[in-house]
Amino acid sequence: MAREKACTVCKASTQREFYPMKEWDVEGPLCGNCYSKRLHDYYPGEHVRVNKDLD
Ligand SMILES: [Zn+2]
C-alpha cells in the first residue's frame, strides 16, 4: 500500500509534497495550496513583479 502524505498545515492528504523554506517555521511537507500561500505571505509578489522604470 502506498503511504499517503499529509500536509502539515491543513492536514489534507497530498500526492505531491512541497517542502517549506527554513524561515517559514513549518516542519513540512506541504500541499501545493499551502505552499503557494506561504510563498505569497513571505514574498508578496517580490520575485514576480519587477519594476521596469528604466526604459
Ligand atoms: Zn495544505
Image (cartoon, grey):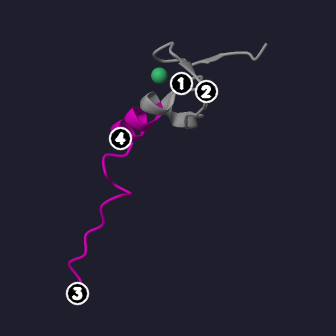
In the image, farthest residue toward the right: 1
Q: Which residues are magenta?
A: 35-55
| Residue sitting at x 52%, y 35% | 23
Query: Within the image, what quadrant is residue 10 found in?
Result: top left
How much space separates mark 1 and mark 3, taking CA atoms?
A: 41 Å
Quadrant showing the C terminus: bottom left
The chief SS type of the magenta part is loop
**Disc 2 crowd, CA 10 A, few/some/many (<14, 14-19, 20+):** few
Residue lying at 51% horizontally and 12% vertically, measured from the top left: 11
**Residue type, mark 1 in image:** Val
The outermost residue toward the front is: 1
Closer-to-camera residue (23/29): 29
Q: Which residue is mark 4?
A: 40
Residue 35 visible in the picture = yes
Can residue 7 be seen in this snapshot? no
Q: Earlier in the sequence, mark 2 or mark 1?
A: 2
Query: Element at badge 3?
Result: loop
Residue on which disc 2 sits: 15
Q: Residues within 10 Å of mark 3 (few under 14, many from 20)?
A: few
Q: Which residue is mark 3?
A: 55
Disc 4 from disc 3: Cα separation: 28 Å
- Return the residue at label 1: 26
Q: Is residue 8 left or right of residue 51?
A: right
